Amino acid sequence: SYELTQPPSVSVSPGQTASITCSGDKLGDKYACWYQQKPGQSPVLVIFQDSKRPSGIPERFSGSTSGNTATLTISGTQAMDEADYYCQAWDRGTAVFGTGTKVTVL
Amino acid sequence: QVQLVESGGGVVHPGRSLRLSCAASGFTFSSYAMHWVRQAPGKGLEWVALISYDGTNKYYADSMKGRFTISRDNSKNTLYLQMNSLRVEDTAVYYCAREDGSGANHWGQGTLVTVSS
């Protein structure tokens, strides 16, 4: 079955840039999206189609892809960005979530 | 505004069945595909199933295929998940979510299913 691999954790200082990677076979041939989930809350879509932001998502969230890796970048990270982040892509008619990354703002 | 409200969760013994519901409001339910996604306690998100806007096409995660059935009633603006032969490892919060064509941009608050003897 298809797998998307993320680093378990990323630490970042306030105001700095956090980058979260998502790797999967031939991921560059698929669209990736990213979800943010804060403790006790439902997930929120922050990036779709690799790099597009839904309405209401701050500009500091951006996405990109290169080869088999998608990357979510949070520029000027704020304390409120501390959360779990999941990538997601489709493979042969099934949706697959990444393993998840906990972003800690120190 | 878009609202998705799950219900039907609870405690159930292994091997038993349970049906979850997701009541939709604030949008034209019959125009959107819908997901079920689950999250075991302290674990990551796991996609369960997707149903097309009209119910014609259904897609399942391999691990759920054959035990879970997704369905919808567009006249009632309601999404369902029938879960049979439940296992301890099916214990999770189950979310419904609206597919907006390139991601799930609206999620319910989730309903907890606990499978335990």
Image (cartoon, grey):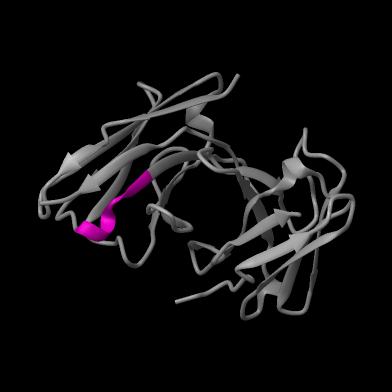
Decide which of B16, B99 is in the foreground and name it. Answer: B16
Find out whether residue B26 is within the magenta segment: no
- Residue A23 on image: x %, y %: 66, 75
Side (left or right) of B52 relative to A75: left
In the image, what residue occupies the spot 48% across and 63% down?
A93
In the image, what residue occupies the spot 53% across and 38% down?
A41
Residue found at the far front of this picture: A106
> Looking at the figure, which quarter contains the N terminus of chain B?
top right
- Residue B66 on image: x %, y %: 23, 61
Q: Would you place residue B106 above or below residue B69 in this image?
A: above
Using the rendered view, name the quadrant where residue B112 is placed. top left
Q: Would you place residue A70 above or below residue B117 in this image?
A: below
Decide which of B82, B111 is in the foreground and name it. Answer: B111
- Residue B60 on image: x %, y %: 37, 58
Decide which of B39, B63 is in the foreground and name it. Answer: B39
Q: Which residues are magenta?
A: B88-93
Side (left or right) of B66 relative to A33: left
